Each structure stands twice: as structure tokens, then as C-alpha cells.
Amino acid sequence: MPAFLTSEPIILASASTSRRRMLEAAGVEVHAEAARVDEEEIKLSGKAAGMKPPEVAEALADLKASKLARKYVGAYVVGGDQMLECDGRWFDKPVDRANAANHLRLLSGRTHTLYSAVVVFHNGTRVWHHIDHATLSMRAMSDAFIERYLDAAGDAVLSCAGSYQVEGLGAQLFNKVKGDHFTIQGLPLLPLLDFLRVRKLLPA
């Protein structure tokens, strides 16, 4: 059982196990609930409107948090999302193993950028947001290694943009990573903790 430090539970508008675990490991008590939004439609419309990946990540985080904020009046609701861009191409979560293998072949030997956004709503109003990014250089990999990696990583890669979890076996895919570890996992955690301290939800 995690040792919570928060004075009241935080609503996490996400089904992401990684984000929930990050917050709980840092002593933040959370109630996690998926905010069902049409992410694909938002990304398509955002791209058509000329939005950049960090703007789309923020829009998705905002929509998720605002949706649950209407349900949990008075609570602090956190929404987070992430976008991956490589050479102007956006990468979503793979739909199956074959799609994951194709993503890894496209990213192999290239540097890509992860944009992570977090938004907080309280009493129906957005009270804070933050966007961060990290750059990751993936080493050149053979098809045989990619298949071996997918065998070992299993279905966990299907929940991750880029088909990897850098905190696990995914570390084998890279030769250089630049950026905050939490941001890479999908949540700019340290700025969020600072905000929670300002709001006296965490001890200073």
C-alpha cells in the first residue's frame, strides 16, 4: 500500500497505469478514471488545422480533464497526454504486433521527440498546465532484434506510443536519451508536484 502524502485524493483523468503509478509512487493519492474522448478525431482535426504535436497533446489533456471535472465538482482533476513525432510524422499506439514492428523499423536509427502535457481543472476551470519534451535517439536495429524484443516485451508495447517503455526492456532500443525521465513516461511529474504544493495539497 503506497504511503500517501496528499491531503485529499486527486482525480486522474486517464486509464494509463504508468501515470497512476508515477503519482502513487510520489505519495499522491489518486482516483483514476478514463475520460472517454475520440483521440483519433482530435488528432486528425488538429493536424488538419495546422496544430503542432505539443498543442495536440495539451488539447487532449485539457479535454480529458475538463470532461471529468464536470463529474467531480470541487476536486482537482489531472489530465495528461503525450505525442510522438519523428521527421514530421506522428506515431500513435500500435494496434497490433505487426504495427508495433513497423513503428520500430521506422524509428530505428532516427531521433524522435516526445511531448508530454498535463492540465489541472478545479471547480470547472483550468487552473494550471505544463508541457515538456524529450528527445530520444533510437539505435539502428535489425528486423531479427525487433522481433526478439517484441517477443520479450509482450502486449505491454501496445499501450505505448513508439512501441516501447524506456523504463523497461525499451532501454535496449536507444543509444541516447535527452530529457526528463517522467516526461518520457508520459507525465511532467516534478512541475505537477510543485503545483500541488502551491495549492497545499502536498506538504511543503
Image (cartoon, helix red, strand yellow):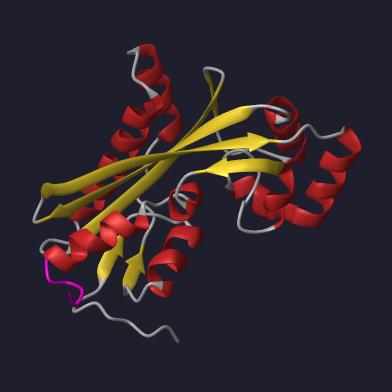
Q: Residue at x 33, y 59 (%)?
A: 190
Location of the C terminus by quadrant is bottom left
197 on left or right of 113:
left
Q: Nearer the viewer, residue 129 or 16?
A: 129
Q: Where does residue 134 sit, x and y in percent of width and height?
A: 47, 40
Q: Residue at x 19, y 77 (%)?
A: 203
**Is residue 111 magenta-colored?**
no
Residue 70: tell me if it is visible. no
Q: Quadrant of residue 32?
A: bottom left
Q: Where does residue 198 sit, x and y in percent of width and height?
A: 13, 64
83 on left or right of 191:
right
Q: Where does residue 78 sit, x and y in percent of width and height?
A: 27, 55
193 on left or right of 153:
left
**Is residue 200 magenta-colored?**
yes
Q: Residue at x 68, y 36 (%)?
A: 138
Q: Residue at x 61, y 38 (%)?
A: 162
Q: Nearer the viewer, residue 196 or 124?
A: 196
Q: Where does residue 117 sit, x and y in percent of width and height?
A: 34, 42
Q: Quadrant of residue 93?
A: top right
Residue 132: tell me if it is visible. yes
Q: Is residue 102 above or below residue 162?
A: above
Q: Is residue 86 above or below residue 71?
A: above
Main secondary structure along the magenta-highlighted residues: loop
Q: Quadrant of residue 39?
A: top left
Location of the N terminus by quadrant is bottom left
All told, the count of numbered labels is: 0
Start-end of magenta stretch: 199-204
